[in-house]
Amino acid sequence: MVKSLRPQNYNEVLYVGHFYRKGVPVLMDLTDLPDVDAKRLVDFATGLVFGRGGALDRVDRKLFLLQP
């Protein structure tokens, strides 16, 4: 199972972390966010993935797959 999330603002990064920490791969769609907020979410996701020893793949310009 892959959880697909489309955050509407930076505060929704909590959901990304929640599912990822449970071991669920997360498809993070940032197309609705301005570039500044999208960059912040990618920075957060990068730290999350690094800390857990997972992988972060860019699928498209603003579409990322976080794998535990």
Image (cartoon, rainbow, N blue to C red):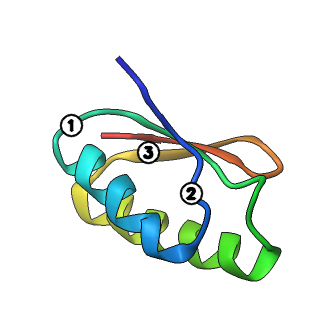
Count neighbours of disc 2 (C-alpha within 10 A) and say few if under 14, some if 14 to 19, many if 20 or more: many
Q: Are marks 2 and 3 in contact (CB under 8 Å)?
A: no
The residue shown at (45%, 75%) is 11
| Extreme residue in the top direction | 1
| Extreme residue in the left direction | 22
The residue shown at (83%, 50%) is 61
Q: Is residue 43 visible?
A: no
Q: Which mark is residue 7?
A: 2
Say whether disc 2 or disc 3 marks the residue closer to the N-terminus.
2
Count neighbours of disc 1 (C-alpha within 10 A) and say few if under 14, some if 14 to 19, many if 20 or more: few
Percent of width and height locating residue 8: 61, 62
Cα distance in 3D space between marks 3 and 1: 12 Å
Front residue of this view, candidates 40 and 50:
40
Label 2: which secondary element = loop
Tell which tag, 1 or 2, sits nearer the viewer.
2
Label 1: which secondary element = loop
Q: Are marks 3 and 1 in contact (CB under 8 Å)?
A: no
Tell which tag, 3 or 1, sits nearer the viewer.
1
Residue 14: quadrant of the picture: bottom left
Q: Note whether 3 is above or below 20 in the view shown.
A: above
| Amino acid identity at mark 3 | Ala
**The N terminus - image quarter:** top left
Percent of width and height locating residue 46: 47, 65
Quickly name the residue at label 1: 23
Label 3: which secondary element = strand
Percent of width and height locating residue 12: 44, 65
Count neighbours of disc 3 (C-alpha within 10 A) and say few if under 14, some if 14 to 19, many if 20 or more: some
Quickly name the residue at label 3: 55
Cα distance in 3D space between marks 1 and 2: 19 Å
